[in-house]
Amino acid sequence: MTKLKSISKISSWFKGLKEPLLIAGPCSAESEAQVMHTAKEIAALGKVAVFRSGIWKPRTRPGNFEGVGEEGLKWLQQVKKETGLLTAVEVANADHVNLAIKHDIDILWIGARTTSNPFSVQELADLLKGYDKPVLVKNPINPDVNLWVGALERFHKAGIDKLAAVHRGFYPFEATSLRNIPKWEVPIELKSLCHNLPIICDPSHIAGSREYIPEISQKALDLNMDGLMIETHYNPSVALSDMNQQLTPKQLGELFDQLIFRRSTTKDEDFTSILETLRSQIDSIDQQMLELLAQRMNIVEDIGKYKSHNKVTILQLRRWEKILQTRMKLGKKLGLTEDFIKKLLQLVHKESIQRQTEVMNKLSSKKE
Ligand code: PEP
Ligand code: MN
């Protein structure tokens, strides 16, 4: 099912643009000097086509650095003039769009928080009607592929065919090593819904920490994604936002040297082979399964502490019987065999009892 019919290829957006599209630049524009310094070093790598920079920053809580505003757009014009890099900014309301157009910004992106709100997306789509600006749509905060497709459709209906999606991961409900869970199965599903839609990966916002950026970037390239957007700052240690997930231009160059760029394919459908798609889905699900098991064990330890304080025995037979009964019923409904569910639960239960025993032994040895 192709929901988005006439999507133009990234290479046709601007003269000389190539795939994979490499976008780099700071999380936020902070000063003219920071922008120019970073842009010149990025341009010198000779690999990046687009300079990104947040001008208005959507912050979870007020009071944090909220961006420099209109002044920053002038610095981006300067970047374009002096380095030849194309420029991209995030827009979230009518003011942003009008100012970005007035300052001749080349590419606009829609942030994750905005994509999550169809009212805002529709307002932006209506405003952009008639302009020939490429629009990049980040995934919504929640792993809801339809909300993502819906946002893309709103722009497409407004006549925008220079469209791409940006995969930046999804909000994790429990702490994980990554800032946002990649859930690779979601962009893969998006690609299977909209075959000709380019998808760019934003490893910085998935990682939250620069050490994971290479691994995530390679994974995106292996899935044949159409580009990378990597936050880059001449000196991340003084960055006013997202300091831990930005690379220096030198580190960005080293990353590009390490990454294995696969031969570019001629067929749009060739996002990834079927086997690779399925394996990526399994990898992502296994990772989530292990994270959930680890969370379960943490709660089990808390229960162990509670039982120890209240002098309750570890094995509560009635609770165990209830677990078995309810999970087997659910498993059956989900198409899993009773035998498999029983064995799995027994294994998990055995490990849980062992964890609780360790916790209780530790607490009682402290008392002695
Ligand atoms: C950003 O790109 O700096 C940004 C705010 O990203 P996101 O909308 O993905 O959180
Ligand atoms: Mn950022």
Image (cartoon, rainbow, N blue to C red):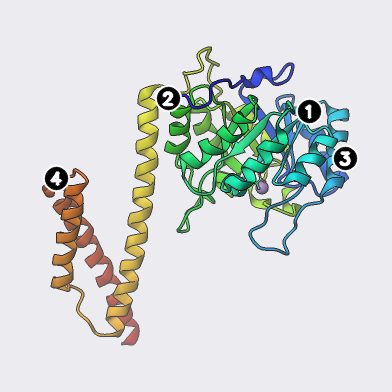
Q: Nearer the viewer, mark 2 or mark 3?
A: 2
Q: Is mark 2 within 8 Å of ligand 1?
A: no
Q: Classify residue 121 by image quadrant.
A: top right
Q: Classify residue 199 by image quadrant.
A: top right
Q: Nearer the viewer, residue 228 or 238?
A: 228
Q: Give the number of the disc on residue 337.
A: 4
Which badge, 2 or 1, is on the more N-terminal residue?
2
Which badge, 2 or 3, is on the more N-terminal residue?
2
Using the image, determine if residue 186 lies above or below residue 362.
above
Measured from the top left, where is residue 191 in percent x and y?
47, 28
Q: CA distance from mark 1 to mark 3?
A: 14 Å
Q: Which residue is mark 2?
A: 1
Q: Which residue is mark 1?
A: 85
Labels 3 & 4 near each other (Cβ < 8 A): no
Which part of the image, by quadrant, shows the N terminus?
A: top left
- As shown in the figure, which amino acid type bears the numbered disc 3? Lys
